[in-house]
Structures are given as C-alpha cells and as structure tokens.
Image (tube, rainbow, N blue to C red):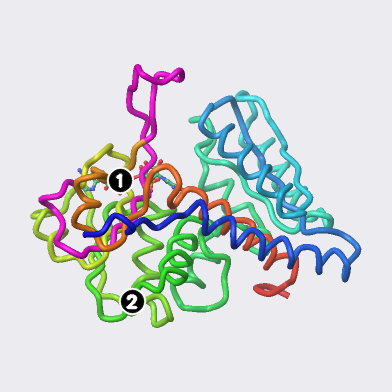
Amino acid sequence: MSQDNLIDGKALSGIIREEIRVEAEKIKEERGRSPKLVAVIVGENPASQSYVRGKVRACDAAAFNSETIKLPDSTSEEALIEVVLKLNTDESVDGFIVQLPLPDHINSDNIIMAIDPKKDVDGFHPVNFGKMAQGLPAFLPATPFGIITMLERYGVETSGKQCVVLGRSNIVGTPISILMSRKAKVGNATVTLTHSRTKNLKEELRRADIIIAAIGIPNFVTEDMVKDGVVVIDVGINRVEDSSRKSGYKLVGDVDFEPVRNKASLITPVPGGVGPMTVCSLLWNTLLAAKGSIYK
Ligand code: NAD
C-alpha cells in the first residue's frame, strides 16, 4: 500500500476549527457574546489536566469563551452535583463537561445524570445517548462524532461494509457501533461489536473493511489480524516507556502502526489522529448548543 494512506486528524481538525471560529464570530455578532464552554476537573490526574488544557486552548483559538473549574480531589459527590446544577441554570454557559475519570468516591453516573441534556456537550447523558440511538437530533459523544466526521471528510464509503469495533465502552465502542449501523450518510455498515469475551477475535478482525479499535492495549492489533486495504481508526492512547525521550514515555495506539499501515488503505496515527478530532467535536457541540440547533 502507498504511504500516503494517513488520515491526518491534526490537519483536519485545524480546518474544522477554522470553520467553527467563523461560525462563533457570527454568533458573537448576533448575540453579543461568544459561545461558552466550561470544563470541570476534580483532582490532579495529569492526563486529565492535559486534556482539559488542550480543550481550553482550542476554545481560545476558536474565539469561544471558556472557563475551567478546578476542584480538589476531596470534593464530595454532593458538592460536585451542586456545581453541575449551578452550571445547568447559568445562562452565560452554553455547554459544559465534567472531565472523566472522577475520583473513586464519586459515582460518575450520578454526575452525568445531573447534567442538563441541553448543555451536555460531551453527549454522555442517557437522553442524548437514547436520541442518538433513535437517529433523533442529539449531542453525539465527542470521540465517535470525531470518527464519523473523519470518515465523511476522507470520503470513506461505509454503506454495506463490514465494520468491526473493538471495545464496548459507553464513551467510544458502544456509541460508535450504533452510529456506524445507523441509516445515515456515514453509517449503513454491518457492525460487529467485539470485546474481552469475544471468541475468534482475529477471524472477526480479518473480515473487516473498517476497524475501529478502542481498548487501551498498546499495539494490540497486529498485521496478521487485518486484511489488505482495511481502513483503520485507532482510538487508543497508551503511554509506553521510552528512555530516549525526556518524558520517559511515548504515546502509542491500540494498533501496531507501521506494519498495519503497510496493509491499510487508510489509517489514523497516534498521536495526531482521533485525539484532535475529539476536541474539535466538543467545540462543534458547543456551537450547536449556542445556536439552539439540537434543543430550543
Ligand atoms: P475502556 O478502557 O473503558 O474499555 C476497554 C474496552 O476494551 C472494554 O469494552 C473491554 O471489553 C475491551 N477489551 C479489553 N481487553 C480486550 C481484549 N483483549 N480483547 C478485546 N476487547 C478487549 O475503553 P475506552 O474508555 O473507550 O478507552 C479505550 C482507549 O481509547 C484508551 O486507550 C483510551 O485512552 C482511549 N481513548 C481515546 C480517546 C481519544 O480522544 N482519542 C477518547 C476516549 C478514549
């Protein structure tokens, strides 16, 4: 396969973010204020801190207002729900997210349930999830939304294709399997959702025209598991030791990148693939919230 088979999520997200910036300027002119996203973060998890910094930087670049609410690790579930309820009624806020994972003493389901679906720009609330599953207007979860946007902009035909999703989390695997099978422009695929109990995983993967890997195991999908010409979307973000780097680690995906790239017709890198698209989708959802496009 040729080596120009990369799906460049970083470049694509730059293009889409510029489109979002133009829309945000228009909203500012019409309403007298920019779309506003608030991120709530509890505790000191370094990966979460870095994700939230990335989201705030993206807001700045897209002419959005943004705010980060940092709460200590000791915050109780009740106190966090209070913060959520305030954001639900704050008219200056179009959308907000509570960065996951939360400390063990907080039940994240209770927090997600407390978010007003109209402001749930992460698309995690069951109301948005249910609407998505029924093909009704909804905030789509950011990572799956980023994946379907990528497939659409790269002109990947999904109709009638065999799509194998690896991993069944509520934030990636399960929703992307629903989106890929929906009757929609990107959709109409025959989807197999695989997970830790799947038997004959290799055979399932070898049948796939499109593989979406979201399990969090470094380099899990190897070249012998894929067929020639496959489209590979690698969602995994895994830290592996790398003594040649100052940080002592590097990021890799769930796919053994170089060997699989040699067989793939298209593939996303890690970093620079799905990650930047996730941030982009969050901004897109906030824009939709500000415009009242999903909920009036
Ligand atoms: P998770 O960690 O909640 O769950 C992992 C899933 O993988 C489970 O459904 C499990 O059944 C499945 N699994 C585990 N071992 C398996 C095996 N041996 N064979 C088959 N299936 C197996 O999933 P998640 O939260 O979706 O995260 C998955 C990865 O995606 C992580 O690396 C995470 O960091 C990354 N992620 C990236 C983004 C992004 O924006 N790029 C967003 C979310 C998650």
| Above or below: residue 71 compared with residue 189 | above
Q: Residue at x 49, y 60 (%)?
A: 146
Q: Is residue 216 magenta?
A: no
Q: What residue would you read off at disc 1?
A: 215
Amino acid of disc 1: Ile
Q: Is residue 162 rendered to the left or right of residue 10?
A: left
Viewer-proximal residue, 79 or 33?
33
Is the CB atom of the residue marked by disc 2 within 8 angstroms of ligand 1's nearest atom?
no
Viewer-proximal residue, 173 or 235?
235
Q: Is residue 91 rendered to the left or right of residue 102?
A: right
Point out the image quarter for the N terminus. bottom left
- From the top left corner, tell me how far across and down residue 243 is, in percent: 35, 17
Is the CB atom of the residue marked by disc 1 within 8 angstroms of ligand 1's nearest atom?
yes
- Number of marks in the rendered image: 2
| Image quadrant in which you'd find residue 24 | bottom right
Q: Residue at x 88, y 67 (%)?
A: 29
Question: Which badge, 2 or 1, is on the more N-terminal residue?
Answer: 2
Q: Residue at x 45, y 64 (%)?
A: 150
Point out the image quarter for the C terminus. bottom right
Circle 2 SS class: loop
Is the Cβ of the residue at disc 2 closer than 8 Å to that at disc 1? no
Near mark 1 (Cα within 10 A), the count class, few <14, some 14-19 or many ≥20, is many
Residue extent of the magenta highlight: 222-251
Q: What residue would you read off at disc 2?
A: 157
